[in-house]
Amino acid sequence: MSTYEILQHYWWAIISLLGGLLVFLFFVQGGNTMIFSLGKTEEQRRLIVNSTGNKWEFTFTTLVTFGGAAFASFPLFYSTSFGGAYWAWMIILFSFVLQAVSYEFQNKIGNLLGTKTYRIFLTINGVIGPLFVGVAVASFFTGSQFIVNKTNFIESQMPVISQWANPLHGLELVEVLNNLLLGVAVLFLSRILGMLYFVNNIKDVDLEKHIRKNLPIETVIFLIFFLGFFVRILRSIGFTAMPSGEIAMEPYKYFHNMIAMPVVSIIFIVGVIGVLFGILGTIYNKSFNKGIWYSGIGTVLTVFGLLLLAGYNNTPYYPSTTDLQSSLTLQNSCSSFFTLKVMSWVSILVPIVLAYIFYVWRKMNAKQIDIDELKQNNEESY
């Protein structure tokens, strides 16, 4: 493997890791979907909103970083997906705008829409964000409808390399069963992570009892959809890049990837175990409140492994169902060797940034929040 190929694989691993972190941080969105169902009183609703409100910037920043890393390392993927399936991405981004506005204005004196309306906006973001991102990730396995023609780049009249072959521009992705299965799975996983985070972050006996009661139901629903997606993908006909560069179909491609890449399979399996350990520990041990860390790290590893399965082992990570040869691989869609090399030096700073985030997180979560604290800091709370 050449240095250029190593850098290509390195940056796909970075993007996969950012994807895992993003799904973990969706506990903010998942928590917000339960503002009205878990929060039986106004005090409990305020606790939920303030608990997620302390972390919502992390989710949005990670989403932007994911897009930036994709643009810099795999620009053809960025232009094809974000430029072609723009309705799907615009819906996601608009929901995050609703989130930012809602946190800022819901508790302002004299706001025209009222607190309840802004909380409904938070709920909308909580559903749309995880659902559509899950659908988008599933398309790495199921494919999308686009055509790539690199010769168009030299055309002065139409220098557009990739074109979307469906007038719905991304909305058609929700019509694919496997995409919907993963989308709903990510949605319910975000709700589970949200509940685990509340158990760790909020001090309210009644709210905690309600969470522990509902957690098994949410877990069963999540497992049904996630296992349904994963089993169907392992049994499906996948996409493979031949040594000649030609894209072909291969039965059981992603099952073969798991066999061919045992390290990636172990990462994925350990991640799933971590998710389940955090959930089951919270369900069966009434004094256990660290489930968010086990399930959170498990989520990062699971998504990390899943995305590696989609891009490694000569697998087109963004397949085209319209024109098979337009499918994007690590080799035919990446930036130049110089760009990847320079970016790799910059990526050395990532552990420092993560360490800072961890430090700030620990300081903010030094103690659980309760309603008395919110009353004392009413002007600073949401």
Image (tube, rainbow, N blue to C red):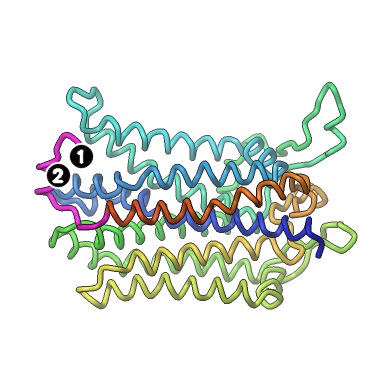
Q: Does residue 180 appear anywhere in the picture? A: no
Residue at the outermost right position: 244
Instruction: State left or right for residue 60 relative to residue 150.
Output: left
Task: Indicate yes or no whether the magenta region holds residue 363.
Answer: no
Q: Does residue 173 appear anywhere in the picture? A: yes
- Quadrant including the N terminus: bottom right
| Amino acid, disc 2 | Leu
Coordinates of residue 269 in the picture (x, y in percent): 53, 75
- Label 1 Cα crowd, 10 Å radius (few <14 / some 14-19 / many 20+): some
Mark 1 secondary-structure assignment? loop
Coordinates of residue 319 in the picture (x, y in percent): 72, 53
Instruction: State left or right for residue 52 relative to residue 336.
Output: left
**Above or below for 283 versus 180:** below
Q: CA distance from mark 1 to mark 2?
A: 6 Å
For the point 17% across and 65% down, the residue is: 209
Q: Main secondary structure of the magenta part?
A: loop
For the point 60% across and 36% down, the residue is: 86
Coordinates of residue 64 in the picture (x, y in percent): 52, 41
Instruction: State left or right for residue 351 relative to residue 11.
Output: left
| Stretch in magenta | 365-382
For the point 24% across and 45% down, the residue is: 50
How many dots with numbers?
2
**Above or below for 83 versus 157:** below
Out of 329 and 370, give the one closest to the viewer. Answer: 370
Q: Quadrant of residue 363?
A: bottom left
Mark 2 secondary-structure assignment? helix
Coordinates of residue 73 in the picture (x, y in percent): 68, 46
| Amino acid, disc 1 | Ser
- Quadrant including the C terminus: top left
**Mark 2 highlights which residue?**
374
Q: Which mark is residue 381?
A: 1
Label 1 close to label 2 by CB (< 8 Å): yes
